[in-house]
Image (spheres, rainbow, N blue to C red):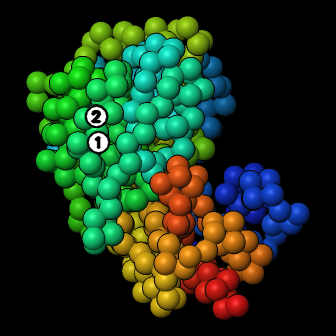
Amino acid sequence: MSIFDQTIKRRCTNSVKWDAMKMVYGLNDASDILPMWVADMDFAAPTAVSKALQKHAERTIFGYSFISEEAIQSIVDWQSTRHDWQIDKDSIVFCNGVVAALANSIVAFTNPGDKVLISTPVYPPFFNIPKSNGREVVSCQLVEKNDGTFIVDFEAFEQALAQNVKAYILCNPHNPGGYVWDEATLKEIVRLCAQYDVVIISDEIHADLMINGEKHIPIAKVAGDEINRIVTCMAPTKTFNLAGIQVSYMIVPDKNKRLQLEAVNMASGQGSLNTFASVALQAAYTEGSPWLDELLPYVSANMDYVKEELEQIPGIRIIKPQSTYLIWIDYRELKLEEKDIMNRLLEIGKLALEPGTKYGEEGQGFLRMNVACSFETVRDGVERFKKAFEQ
């Protein structure tokens, strides 16, 4: 029996995933809805992390603290061991979340009115953060191949860059599709961004969640002489289910860019990580590998089950993700409107998934399902999905 077979009750714990559905979906009552939407896991974090936090809590005094050299070194060691990527510890800039890191990078490296490029469909903050900071978002749609996977249309990509774009936000691996970008794609992104003098802000929060032996390639690792135009945003939070801890970091090889980011932090009154965040990060990166190595095949098996079962419904197509614990479900052949699909799922199936248009209009005809939960929960979710389409 796997440690991930345990179904942990999360209702009434102030969980966004379990306790905020009434507000998010506009429901009168969500007590019988199964949430498989927002990207956090229903698994307990590694025991080593919990023990480290408990030990730290016993100190009873939680005054100002700084990030230990051991915590910083754990990041360097993790990147080396997990991704064969050698980084300089001086290149690390801390932040309280990857979304916050994206925002700080946008403020640091662009000006109000500047254009920021994204590849859609993509994680909603890629739209919202630049707009909220007075930047103009330019979208370049990913292109679907015959096998249902997506690639970058580099002709359209270059045309977009030529519109005087100042920054490109890359999602590597891709959310919601779960695509792992290959080296050739990443190198071409770097080449074109260098040609048009564009800063690359790479969200690599799902880097550790590789399915079936896939390998993550940090874009900075293959950037060569253009490495100084790249800011890589990473965190242990998706990997080890620590989103509520709020800890992330940016790997910024260029000293001038680090100074710019530090200036943004000072202007906004942001300080260092909270005292528990660095403890959790260090414990996860130094002792969490066995937990992660058990997690990945478990999630992969959940994905296989969902694909096999849901594709029995005529009109449903699923391309198994290469990364993440999120499945991008294609229902376009059903010829149903998104509102009708969502109503069926919520009202008949009692199941909360994410509508594809949350990731841009290019997500029309898709749903996102989170399968980072016990197989018992996954099986329940599949049956609820099927029930929604029985009528």
Q: Quadrant of residue 73?
A: top left
Q: Does 88 sit left or right of 299 as displayed?
A: left
**How many numbered badges does the structure rendering display?**
2
Looking at the image, the residue that sits furthest to the right is: 28
Q: Residue at (46%, 8%) from the top-left corner? A: 263
Residue carrying label 2? 159
Q: Residue at (15%, 48%) from the top-left corner? A: 183
Residue 228 location in percent, x, y?
A: 22, 21
Asked if one can make out residue 244 in the rendered structure from this viewpoint, the answer is: yes
Asked if one can make out residue 249 in the rendered structure from this viewpoint, the answer is: no
Which disc number belongs to residue 201? none
Q: Does 103 sit left or right of 9 as displayed?
A: left
Q: Does 191 sit left or right of 177 as displayed?
A: left
Compared with 355, 128 (above or below) is: above
Circle 2: is it few (<14), some (14-19), or many (20+) Cα within 10 Å? few
Q: Amino acid at mark 1?
A: Ala
Q: Residue at (49%, 38%) from the top-left corner? A: 126
Task: Name the one closer to the observer, 247 or 77.
Answer: 247
Residue carrying label 1? 156
Q: Quadrant of residue 6?
A: bottom right
Compared with 118, 383 (above or below) is: below
Residue 252 location in percent, x, y?
A: 30, 23
Circle 1: is it few (<14), some (14-19), or many (20+) Cα within 10 Å? some
